[in-house]
Image (cartoon, rainbow, N blue to C red):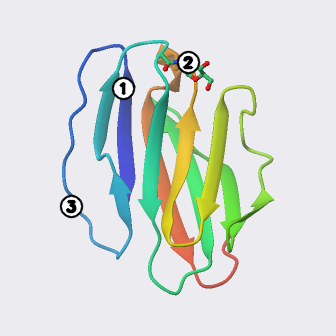
Amino acid sequence: MNTRFFCHVAFILWRAGLLDAGITQTPRYLVTWKGDNVTFRCDPIKGHTWVYWYQQLLDKEITFLISFQSSTPMNDLGMHKLRFSAKCSQNSPCELSIQISEPGDSGIYFCASSETTVL
Ligand SMILES: *[C@@H]1O[C@H](CO)[C@@H](O)[C@H](O)[C@H]1NC(C)=O
């Protein structure tokens, strides 16, 4: 599942899931003002303990941001720590937040989940 994120304009558009893999990501589309903070949410598949976030900037390759196992960050080497943060807590969606969004953050943000480690 993925969330398309465009930074610059002043409205937020939601769209319900198209691909249903059991993961729910909200919002589906998000358009925001430059400088605003944004948060993406992801409900992993029930029973899955690993959660992964990926980013695909416009015209770029997909890159890995961070993984969690049972709410604990496992690998955050891909995170841009100055403005990006993520958290997963039990019984609530995982969140990926961007502070002071920039046009260069525009792209697609993917969330995935698995029972065990996936590269
Ligand atoms: C974004 O988050 C930062 C840090 O939490 C906060 O200081 C700032 O006021 C927020 N900006 C907006 C536009 O909400």
Respond yes or no on whether mark 1 lies under 8 Å from ligand 1: no
Q: How far apart are marks 1 and 3 (CA)?
A: 19 Å
Q: What element carries label 1?
A: strand
Q: Report if the beta carbon of the residue with label 2 is closer than 8 angstroms to ligand 1.
A: yes
User: For mark 2, what is the residue?
Assistant: 100
Numbered disc 2: secondary structure: loop
Labelled disc at residue 103: none
Badge 3 element: loop
Picture residue at 25% right of the left edge, 30% below the top: 12
Relative to 96, is 22 on the left or the right? left
- Left or right of 28 in this view: 45: right
Instruction: Look at label 1 and name its amino acid.
Output: Phe
The earlier-in-sequence mark between 1 and 3 is: 1
Query: Which label belongs to residue 18?
Result: 3
Q: Do the residues labelled 1 and 3 touch (CB within 8 Å)?
A: no
Residue type at mark 2? Ile
Question: Which quadrant contains ligand 1?
Answer: top right
Q: Which residue is drawn at 44% across and 26% down?
A: 106
